[in-house]
Amino acid sequence: MLGAASALLLRRPRLVWLALAWLWLCSMPITGNLLIRAAEQGAVRLPAETVQQAQAVVVLSGMARTVNAPPSSTPYVREWGDAVDRLEGGLALMRAKRAPRLIFTGGRVPWDVLPTTEGDWLMEHARNRGLPAAAISITPPVQNTAEEAQAVAAMLKGSPSPHILLVTSAFHMPRAKALFEAQGLRVTPYPVDFRARTGGVLRCMGSKPYDF
């Protein structure tokens, strides 16, 4: 294998160096930051009290993961992942009285070993934070954003032109908004969990290649 690589380097050195330069460029934090910034499409974090009112706040799953637990307890438990701001954003909108109802989606992938959905777990946390159970709903189990949109639309189908405040990660919002609107819902986005760095190009260039 090394011999083949050496032969290629001798025959086509420009191609090899271009490939190495491309790999180096893709590993740089500034590249990842630019891609994330493009995905977030210039979205900003809004104060909850400035958002218009709607029929429901919808918080998408994707902020928890299943991990091993001590043998003396249940075999597996959930813990927070990177997108916990989705829950915080939903609770902030409810505290600001932007909607009378909070809907969690029942995220559960086929390989999840826990019998409950992420929505069940989130409802427990919301109740522990003071939100009454009567104000919280959970969709049936769903596996992806398209199913989340279908499930929420089914829950609100009795309302003419149902209006929701959609809470998800900023990079995920454009796709999620389109899927929910395709189900006939009027969507006001409330993006959270911003991944793009602020502070300009020099800050990104000064970061370590693996420090996104």
Image (spheres, helix red, strand yellow):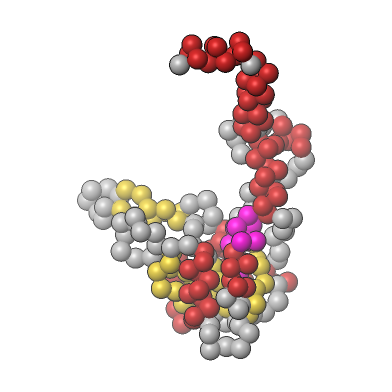
For the point 51% across and 66% down, which residue is it?
A: 146
Within the magenta stretch, is there residue 129? no
Q: Quadrant of residue 133?
A: bottom left
In the figure, residue 211 lies in which quadrant?
top right
27 relative to 149 in the view: left or right: right
Residue 168 is a magenta residue:
yes
Residue pictured at 62% horizontal, 23% vertical: 20
Whole-percent x, y for residue 207 in the image = 66, 32
The answer to whether residue 107 shows anywhere in this view is yes
Q: Is residue 22 above or below residue 91?
A: above
Q: Considering depth in this image, is 148 or 82 the residue closer to the camera?
A: 148
Which residue extends farthest left?
72
Quadrant holding the N terminus? top left
Placement of 144 over or under 134, stated as above or below: above
Q: Which residue is drawn at 41% across and 73% down?
A: 140
Q: Number of labelled discs?
A: 0
Q: Give the range drawn in magenta.
A: 166-175
**Picture layout, residue 163 above or below residue 208:** below
Relative placement, left or right, of 43 versus 6 is: right
As drawn, 44 above or below 197: below
Q: In which quarter of the image is the C terminus?
A: top right
Of residues 139 and 128, the one drawn nearer to the viewer in this rendering: 139
Report the residue at 63% width, 25% height from top. Answer: 19
- Image location (x, y in percent) of residue 68: 32, 48
Left or right: residue 151 versus residue 17 is left
